[in-house]
Image (cartoon, rainbow, N blue to C red):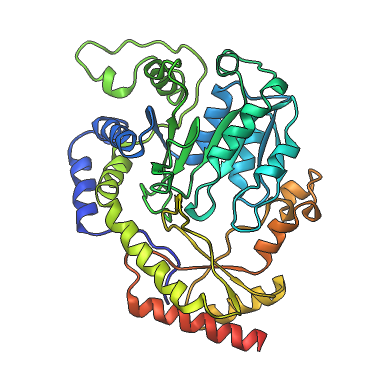
Amino acid sequence: MIPFSPPRIDQRVIDEVTAALKSGWITTGPRTKQFEKEITAYCGNKTTVAVNSWTAGMELLLRWWGIGEGDEVILPAYTYCASANVIIHAGAKPVLVDLNAEDFNLSVEAVRKAITPRTKAIMAVDIAGFPCDYDKLYELIEEVKPLFQPNSNFQRQLGRIVLVADAAHSFGATLNGKRSGSLADLTCFSFHAVKNLSTAEGGAMLINLPDDFDHEAIYKDLCIKILHGQSKDALAKAQKGNWRYDVVEPGFKCNMTDIQAALGLVELDRYQENMDRRKAIFDQYDAAFISDSRFITPLYKTTNKETCYHLYLLRIAGATEAQRDAIMQAIFDQDVSVNVHFQPLPVLTAYKSRGYDMKDYPEAWNKYANEITLPVYFDLTDEQVQTVIAAVKNAVQQVMG
């Protein structure tokens, strides 16, 4: 069976994680701090705090920014449930919008129509690792500044809607030569097991606010918030005679460990090698499908944008949802694993029951109903890629004729 997206675990990773285990320091410590610094250097943002998941990091960012009851956060209907779940957990309302026709990202014009005086944030989701139109979103945010009604000190200091990147998929992607992590005011990465850069579970909060914000103070504040509001972390307390600490607020518990960071440091060091291999797989899929009218290949590179080659979102032209599902089963029957990214939020019970209606997001449905995500990972061989291609074509012929 060709798996969908196994992590790259080789001897180098095993050795580094073993070294972390033998070091005597396995919770948040020197490797985590190094990982944060190297992420900042790679992405070009102003400061980074590593956490134990995208979800914990994004919820914390929203709460820290003062988003809560009565507020609205705009995001695409086409995303994983975590994007909207954290908004609800923070007490705010997710406002869903439809997608562009040409890609899987949210439509700036749809965002424009959704903005109200209650809008505190726009959460752009880089589906499959392809960056959203951040420059256009910033232009829109400037246009609607007169509508903005701040309700926290940070919001008053910024004086506009905050632009947030759900960059769970897009570590390494670029827009106008800038890397994901430096494209929005606030960004969250996921380092889950299936991501391009994995720490098994994990994530990072990246802050890239205007220069009048004190990013060093923000870093210290967020480090306190991720550890129950404790004034010192375990590394600081380990210093001789430095045991006493204070709890300055009822915080959260979502710090990254040095075991996770050890894995992440290896993955970051060889990240370009990973992306190069993934790009080669994308190119082989394109060569096989782009000239075949039965398929719609994804947009993943333009004059100013380039994906990080996380997911290859192939669509079957003219297929219904039922036909797509039958095609997937026929692919599985050939011992090839595929997936769907994603079921739009309004088809899920948690959001359908809150009044979201799939009919309001026709482009999201159009993308979802015939989408199949193909395997892309470093250890996938060229021979296996050809096996995937053959399985997909055989399945489409079997179901669609």
Q: Residue visible at 22% across and 10% down?
A: 241
Circle count: 0
Left/right of residue 374 with respect to residue 97 in the rendered view: left
Query: Nearest the camera: 238 or 121?
Result: 121
Left/right of residue 276 with respect to residue 106 in the rendered view: left
- Seen as rendered, the residue at the extreme front is 303
Query: Nearest the camera: 22 or 94?
Result: 94
- Residue 87 position in % (x across, y down): 64, 35
Q: Quadrant of residue 320?
A: bottom right
Q: Is residue 303 above or below residue 125?
A: below
- Residue 226 position in % (x across, y down): 44, 26
Q: Residue visible at 63% across and 47% down?
A: 106
Left/right of residue 211 with respect to residue 142 in the rendered view: left
Query: Nearest the camera: 331 or 11?
Result: 331
> Can the viewer see residue 90?
no
Q: Quadrant of the C terminus?
A: bottom right
